[in-house]
Image (spheres, grey):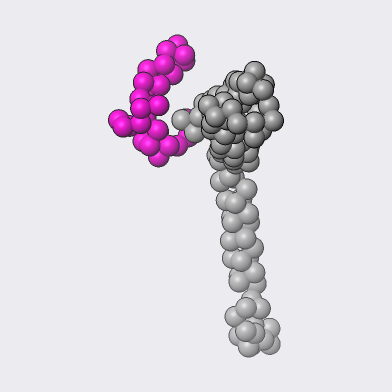
Amino acid sequence: LSHLQYHTQPWFNRFYVYVVTLAALLALCMLYSLYPVRRIPTIVTMAPTMDKATARMSLSRACIFLARELVLLDGLPRMTKGEISGTLDAFIQKYEEADRAVRLGDKDLGILQGADHRSTVHNDVMYKLGCPWRQHFGHRRANEEE
């Protein structure tokens, strides 16, 4: 009787279907919990890197604005020549700090791995011939790491 009852059950109510489904579910859970472990530095670094990259862009615009105002001195920003040059110097220092953090990483700012160490596409663009502002930086970086 139980043998006949087993054959009349639909396939999705059989015991082996539950066992196979449970095994597949556990395997997927382990895969999705273990796979991102290799990517944790990249995942953790993503938000601070984007924050500093955005700050770098806004700081570059502010430096351009202040340099223009330093040349024109038309009184639009209502700052003196000394205030403009002091602010420009501070913004340039902040820009260099943000740029260094994005490229090389800075644990104090939450960027565990810089773009130079994790992205070959970034390095192909930034350090190829034709980028005069980065052309010789690779030699300096090699000397800094020693």
Between 17 and 128, the residue placed more toward the observer is 128
Tell me what residue is drawn at x 58 percent, y 61 percent. 24
Between 127 and 89, the residue placed more toward the observer is 89
| Image-based side of 144 in relation to 70, left or right | left
Q: Is residue 132 magenta?
A: yes
> Which of the 4 image quadrants contains residue 74?
top right
What is the x, y in percent for residue 106?
60, 25
Q: What stretch is highlighted in magenta?
A: 117-146
> Which of the 4 image quadrants contains residue 122?
top left
Which corner quadrant holds the N terminus? Answer: bottom right
Tell me what residue is drawn at x 65 percent, y 28 percent. 109
| Image-based side of 116 in relation to 105, left or right | left
Between 146 and 31, the residue placed more toward the observer is 146
Q: Can residue 144 be seen in this view?
A: yes
Q: Can residue 63 be seen in this view?
A: no
| In the image, farthest residue toward the left | 129
What is the x, y in percent for residue 92?
57, 24
> Which of the 4 image quadrants contains residue 42?
top right
Q: Does the magenta stretch include residue 28?
A: no
Tell me what residue is drawn at x 31 percent, y 32 percent. 130
Query: Eyeballing the image, is 16 above or below 114?
Result: below
Which corner quadrant holds the C terminus? Answer: top left
